[in-house]
Amino acid sequence: MYGQYEHTVDAKGRMNFPAKLLKELGEHFYISKSINEKCLTVYTGESWDALRDKLKGNSSKNALIVQRFIFGSACEAEPDKQGRIALPAALRTYAGITGEVVVVGMADRAEIWDKSAWEEYSKVFDTVDFDIAQGELGI
């Protein structure tokens, strides 16, 4: 998944999801809190299963905290005929989503950001030395 798309969340918590990404996500997919940032992560069924399997059976204190954080407020999303999905209030509150959002493709998943939070976060791109980052990542 790739690209950046702007949409609006209506008063009922529904948003049009990018058609291009819907094709990659399939008929239903999963949305949860993001661990690293105040945004939402959108998983394909396959990537959700892989995450679940990776965490399943690990009863360390940190693993249980992560499981409760991710799975406790997650939802399964099924777009309606207009391509809209419903974002539960708890997830909107966590990510600070009040109206305009940005959906960002992240290879095997996507993120949903409040537009103003995304604009603030995007400032980090001006501070990164991409030559060094490429070397560290081997790309």
Image (cartoon, rainbow, N blue to C red):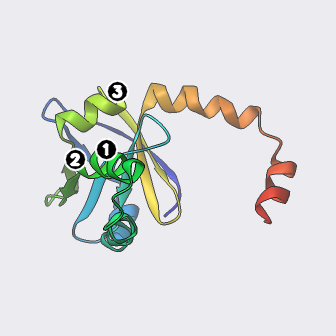
| CB under 8 Å between discs 1 and 2 | yes
Question: Which residue in the structure is indicated by mark 3?
Answer: 96
Where's residue 20, x and y in %?
Answer: 40, 63
Question: Which residue in the structure is indicated by mark 1?
Answer: 69
**Mark 3 is on which residue type?**
Gly
For residue 24, the mark is none
Question: Which residue in the structure is indicated by mark 2?
Answer: 72
Which of discs 2 and 3 lies nearer the camera? The answer is 2
- Disc 2 and disc 3: Cα gap in Å? 18 Å
Q: In the rendered view, would you say 124 is above or below 6?
A: above
| Residue at horizontal 68 percent and vertical 33 percent from the top | 124
- Mark 2 and mark 3 lie on one chain; the one further toward the N terminus is 2
Q: In the rendered view, would you say 132 is above or below 23?
A: above
Which of discs 1 and 3 lies nearer the camera? The answer is 1
| Residue at horizontal 34 percent and vertical 70 percent from the top | 23
Foreground residue among 7 and 93: 93
**Mark 2 is on which residue type?**
Gly
Q: Which SS class for mark 2?
A: helix
- Mark 1 and mark 3 lie on one chain; the one further toward the N terminus is 1
Foreground residue among 92 and 115: 92
The image quadrant where one finds the C terminus is: bottom right
Q: Is residue 17 left or right of residue 126?
A: left
Where's residue 113, x and y in %?
Answer: 42, 37
Image quadrant of residue 89?
top left
Where's residue 76, x and y in %?
Answer: 19, 58
Where's residue 94, x and y in %?
Answer: 31, 31
| CB under 8 Å between discs 2 and 3 | no
Q: Is residue 120 left or right of residue 81?
A: right
Q: Which SS class for mark 3?
A: loop
**Mark 1 is on which residue type?**
Phe
